[in-house]
């Protein structure tokens, strides 16, 4: 369960302050993927489903990426009957807190989305945790929708690991997308609705700022 729901404000600020360092450290400069899909010649819609810890921050990052038209927080990896926040928070459902990203492939490629994912949206070397949140529901995962996405994701992870871009190996799991279940309405656009919440200030706003600094050509003001 997210720190903001289980700790008092004093403990939350202390814990989130520690997590802030993790958020800053995850802003890593990485190369473009060698294997990527070319930009489409015509406007369209494609979907990417990614998981990287609490979905609030990952959603907020991709809402500021040019070429992305819609981002939804939800659950992937488990069954429909366990796709509720309280149940997912037990860590026993197989679900990961995920985001569904609808994007225009004529504006941004799948590989570029993964570059943002690995460099500023989360730390792909943390196993079953991100910042103050721990459990399999906070794992790093890519849920691919077709063979092309699988090839690009696996090749990029191999490329980054071989180049030793991070201080440790990437632990991101690449799995086929079975289903995506939209999270409860109060989770959607959480950062926009709660910008002054300590958890958001220390964990998620730095990610959006890192996106703006590291990817000025991709960043858009929401």
Image (cartoon, rainbow, N blue to C red):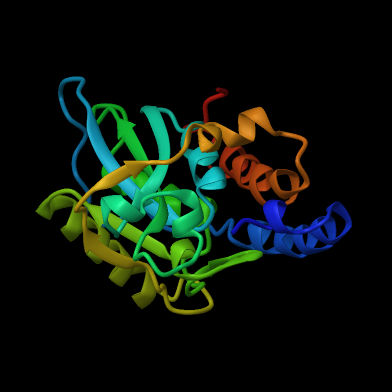
Query: Which of the image's four quarters has the N terminus?
Result: bottom right
Q: Where residue 41 sits: x, y (%)? A: 15, 24
Question: Relative to the observer, which residue lies in front, 222 or 39?
Answer: 222
User: For the image shown, how many numbered marks are present on the structure?
Assistant: 0
Q: Where residue 112 sits: x, y (%)? A: 35, 45
Residue in the image at 23% along x and 48% along y: 179
> Is 136 rendered above or below residue 2?
below
Tell whether 12 sits left or right of 117: right
Tell whether 156 sits left or right of 89: left
Tell whether 61 sits left or right of 44: right
Query: Which of the image's four quarters has the C terminus?
Result: top right
Q: Where residue 113 sits: x, y (%)? A: 36, 44
Residue in the image at 26% along x and 56% along y: 79
Q: Can residue 100 be seen by looking at this rendering?
A: yes
Query: Quick one: which residue is furthest to the front in this view?
Result: 81
Residue in the image at 65% along x and 41% along y: 209
Q: Where residue 185 sits: x, y (%)? A: 49, 32
Residue 68 occupies quadrant: top left
Residue in the image at 55% along x and 59% along y: 28
Residue 164 occupies quadrant: bottom left
Tell whether 34 sits left or right of 207: left
Question: Relative to the observer, which residue lies in front, 89 or 24?
Answer: 89
Query: Quick one: which residue is furthest to the right in this view?
Result: 10
Q: Can residue 114 be seen by looking at this rendering?
A: no
> Is 150 rendered above or below residue 221?
below
């Amino acid at each position: 369960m997210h720190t903001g729901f289980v700790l008092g404000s004093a403990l939350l600020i202390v814990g989130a302050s520690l997590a802030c360092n993790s958020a800053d450290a995850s802003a890593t400069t990485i190369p473009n993927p060698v294997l990527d899909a070319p930009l489409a010649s015509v406007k369209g819609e494609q979907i990417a489903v990614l998981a990287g810890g609490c979905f609030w921050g990952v959603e907020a990052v991709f809402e500021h990426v040019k070429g992305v038209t819609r981002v939804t927080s939800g659950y992937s990896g488990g069954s429909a009957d366990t796709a509720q926040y309280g149940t997912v928070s037990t860590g026993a459902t197989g679900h990961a807190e995920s985001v569904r990203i609808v994007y225009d492939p004529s504006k941004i490629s799948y590989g570029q989305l993964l570059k943002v994912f690995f460099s500023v949206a989360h730390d792909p070397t943390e196993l079953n945790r991100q910042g103050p949140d721990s459990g399999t529901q906070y794992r790093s995962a890519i849920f691919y929708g077709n063979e092309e996405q699988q090839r690009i994701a696996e090749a990029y992870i191999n490329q980054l690991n071989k180049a030793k871009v991070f201080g440790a190996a990437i632990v991101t799991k690449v799995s086929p997308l079975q289903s995506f279940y939209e999270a409860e309405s109060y989770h959607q656009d959480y950062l926009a609705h709660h910008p002054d919440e300590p958890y958001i200030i220390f964990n998620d706003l730095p990610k959006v700022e890192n996106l703006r600094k590291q990817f000025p050509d991709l960043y858009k003001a929401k």
